[in-house]
Image (cartoon, grey):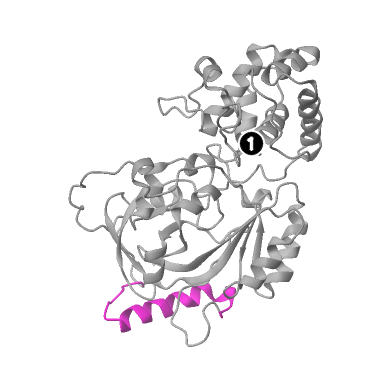
Amino acid sequence: MTRSPRDSGTTDASSDLADAVEPDGSAEPGIVRVPARERVDGPPGRRALALVVAGIAVVAAAAATGGVIAALNSAPPKTQTASPPSAPGHVTNVAQGNQIAPLRRVVPPDVLAVAARSVSSVQIGRIRKLKQVQDVIAVDAAAVQLQGRQINTFAVDPSIFRSWTPPGTAKNEELWTALASDKFIVSETAMETMGLRGGFGYSIVGKTVPTVTMGGAGPLGLPGIDMLVSLKTGDALQLIPRLAVLVNAPGADPKKLSSGLKKILGAGAEVRNLHEKKNQVTGRSGSYLDLYKKAATTCPGLSWTVLAAIGQIESDHGRNAGPSSAGALGPMQFMPATWKTYGVDGDGDGKADIMNPYDAVPGAAKYLCANGAGGGGKHLYNAIFRYNHADWYVQKVLNLAKAYARTYS
């Protein structure tokens, strides 16, 4: 690509590629259950995870004593909506208005944990010290009621949390702008099963019952977590502070990481290894692992492991998308001039975006293929050399690709 060699990644094969799973709201194995938001006298979060269903009745009682009668025992209509909202006014450009921070990186979560009570700052500090942990985020959470059904909900800062969602969702400016405007967003499954419609208001039953407008839907990438609300809405619903934790630890053994989390969070904590098959679903590519595998199919003879190795070295799978000192951009670190020739519209949105992993990864496959990577051997070596003109870089890519093959064989 005619640019300065970069070495922004790590040398071990990351185990954080398969990061996205589609929550389905069921009680099947692999689905995280979140305590219901209920009125209690003790510290928030002090309730058993096994009492989620019983907590629904408590939520209903709390809502009723607050002056609002919630008919939770009767079957709601498939689509229960308020009147359509009035026509919106001028929409501020996010990049100009600074309503939400632009997406700078994607942080694939390796483990999701739901504690039995609020996670303390001391516990967060201990989690950060676990081997190979790079990022940790704690969020307010609870099971609330929407359309007469229980739905596990996170209250988040959209500028921060977007990085923890699947690449396609993370780059969806409309979703995060809606969340920043105190609307709620849901998984696609929740939208379909509950008959929800964007732009309509719905009553959300927590400790209070605010009417909140639905802002959109998309894959959230977390098993059993089907709704995100703003911090303001979360405060109104009185979700449990810092109840859930997401951890990113590239290269760590997810099983050992999960075990470490359980020890720190104590009895009653539910920890999910997001790499386990039961915590993953099929569907649109939602992880970098999926993207590398899919892109490799466009170039017969090219292994997805080569793309994964390049993606790790160049940006650590989107965590450092540039610009580099040489001006390279995006998760696969293309020079803009090269992108004009090899850019791909991988997600069919009508544009080839150098910063979008759905476009950048197949763009890298196209570039390598055009330079003979599908031929293997010396042809692959030369193609990688064209990607970055340094023999050490080629050797690093090939060795890392072998490590990926061993890890994901």
What kind of element bears circle 1? helix
- Where in the figure is residue 177, as x and y percent of width and height? 37, 48
Question: Does residue 292 belong to the magenta stretch?
Answer: no
Can residue 353 be seen in the rendering of this structure?
yes
Residue 173 sits above or below residue 135 on the image: above
Residue furthest bottom as drawn: 41
Q: Is residue 31 left or right of residue 152?
A: right
Residue drawn at x 32%, y 71% is 209
Residue 374 sits above or below residue 241 on the image: above
Residue 357 picture quarter: top right
Residue drawn at x 33%, y 46% is 97
Instruction: Give the quadrant of the C terminus.
Output: top right
Amino acid identity at mark 1: Ser
Residue drawn at x 45%, y 78% is 38
* Residue under label 1: 315
Residue 3 sits above or below residue 258 on the image: above
- Where in the figure is residue 252, as x and y percent of width and height? 75, 51
Can residue 301 be seen in the rendering of this structure?
no
